[in-house]
Image: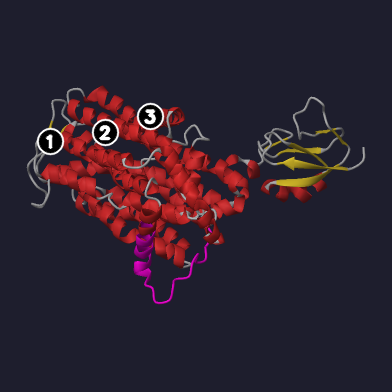
Amino acid sequence: MANVSVIIPFEAEGTVVVGTPKSIMKDHEDLVKGTATVDVVDAAIDENSPPNVLLEEGSKEELLLEKGESKNGSTDLRCQCLRFGGVEVAQGFNLIGSGRGCLVMSNIFLATALTYLAAEEVGCVKEDDNGAMIVADNCDEKVFGLFRPASLITNIAVIWGVLAALFMPVIGACIDYTPHRWRIGAGSAAFLIMIQLVQIGVASSTWFYMAMLQALSGFLYQVQNLTAYAYLPEIARIVGEEKITKYMPTFTIVQFLSQALFLLLVIAVSLSLGFGDVQTARLSQVFNACTVSLTFFCGWRLMPPIPARHILPEGRSMLLQGFRQNFTTAKEINQHYRIGLRWFLLSVTFGDAAANAFTIVSVVFLDERLGLAGNEVGIFFFLALIGMIPGGKLAQLVASRTNPKVSWIISMVVLFVVSAVGALLLDKDNAVPFAFVWGFIIGVSLGWYYPSERTILSMIVPQGREAEVSGFFIYCTQILGWLPPLVFSLLVEADVDQGIGVICISAFFLIAIFAMSMSGPWQEILEEVKGTDSTAANIIDNDDRGRNLEVIYSKTEEASPCGTAKTLESSS
């Protein structure tokens, strides 16, 4: 048979390329990137084969690009799904996300240990009927005469929340206007690794210093998160829109599995060895320090330095540029997108503050009010993670029957009701197993909330302003992150029942519901965006194409069975 040429799509599952080894290797790199023309020698097309699959006649080489298998069944490492087509920045982003997942879960165990040690400091620890040491009910003693042990974790959250609200615009400006993005990411990763190593030594004599380090760690985690996600536009530009929509679910699944496996490992070892809260926290920090060191080190080695994306205008201060940009964006949104986007972002500000704070407050509520041990708190969050999967499917179902706006509002109503019912009905007598059922339902509700929110964002961001609006959206999710924990701390200090505190935190959802209800009908919201697209398209900067971090994420969540599982990242 004479030589022929054929276009082999890399995306075709199980594609077989047949030819001489020389012809295959010649075009192999092009095949990995997308499609290529391959010289096929003495090859025939089997009539029973799927399209684009060539079968050899003689003793030729064959390569399964998509599945990564060779003729003898061995695996081609270059073709595994986690290799991301050899794109190192995608590999690095995936590793960093895996490390962040483990870090967040470890902080749950550390939080219970710090609460216990703070109570021990003021003499509020007693022995129960089984001989175990537990925190006494209604402890009125104050640590250093300043605060009760129950408000320690929320006070830590207030500190790093205020730091994030004040300094994230500055960090964002440094990422955009300087060539130091890699240094910021790698530096924050290095400090986080050192903090995790030091916190292995959490004990009665060191708990206060560890708590201060935890406040710093929470802020550095936000810096790490922002810097890593700033690389998504580069990944999108390298691999293209079609590939990034396939990669994003993989990123989410890997982080989800990292969190779940980390929780299972710590819980299993802790239960088998009979560890208490402090021992479980140390064990968790050992595992966490190892995983974070490996994933952050390898991940940031794969991330390239990026030049400045923009030039700072003459006479402008780097410290103020981020705030100035946010103010300008807010003013223009209020002026031009009054029907939908304005109310959506206001709703996000309060809704995400409540959702993120619940992760933090629930640790205190489960430990102090319900008397769950550290490993039992871990089980609660594991079940919440699992619950997020059907929650994502529920979000799709409700949105298809109504619209994304209605689905998101209903999810917030459900979150408020479920949180309030659990806070009122649960106590130490029925905490096991009903607290675990509550955790699963909370997970379902959060798995409904976050994908609905991201879907709305992806549909109402004006064309040509994706980067600007997405950056402002991220800031809206952080700006009030300190307020719900502060409210909870104040209520605890005023000797108000913690169940009431949980309800007050959930009440932020009611403000978000009211704000979103003020927006126009869904079709009018979409029409408002379409009416401004043509104007925005005329002024779009080519460098900003593909920079929409959250829109890319939201459009790809539905492609994965775990893609809707919003990770519990706020508990750091």
Residue at image point 28% right, 49% down: 481
Nearer the observer, 396 or 461:
461
Q: Position of residue 505 (x, y in %)?
A: 22, 40
Please report the residue visible at 46 percent of the width from the left and 52 percent of the height from the top: 229
Badge 3, how many Cα within 10 Å: few under 14, some, many 20+?
Answer: many
Instruction: Specify the segment rendered in magenta.
Output: 303-330
Relative placement, left or right, of 128 versus 321 is left
Amino acid bearing label 1: Asp
Task: Examine the structure image and report whether residue 329 is included in the region drawn in magenta.
Answer: yes
Amino acid at the residue labelled 2: Phe
Seen at 46% across and 29% down, the residue is 400
Q: The residue tagged with tag 2: helix, strand or loop?
A: helix
Label 3 vs label 1: CA separation? 27 Å
* Residue hosting label 3: 387
**Label 1: which residue?**
497
Q: CA distance from mark 2 to mark 3?
A: 17 Å
Does the residue at mark 2 contact the one at mark 1 (Cβ under 8 Å)?
no
Label 2 belongs to which residue? 416
183 relative to 394, above or below: below
Q: Amino acid at mark 3?
A: Gly
Q: Earlier in the sequence, mark 3 or mark 1?
A: 3
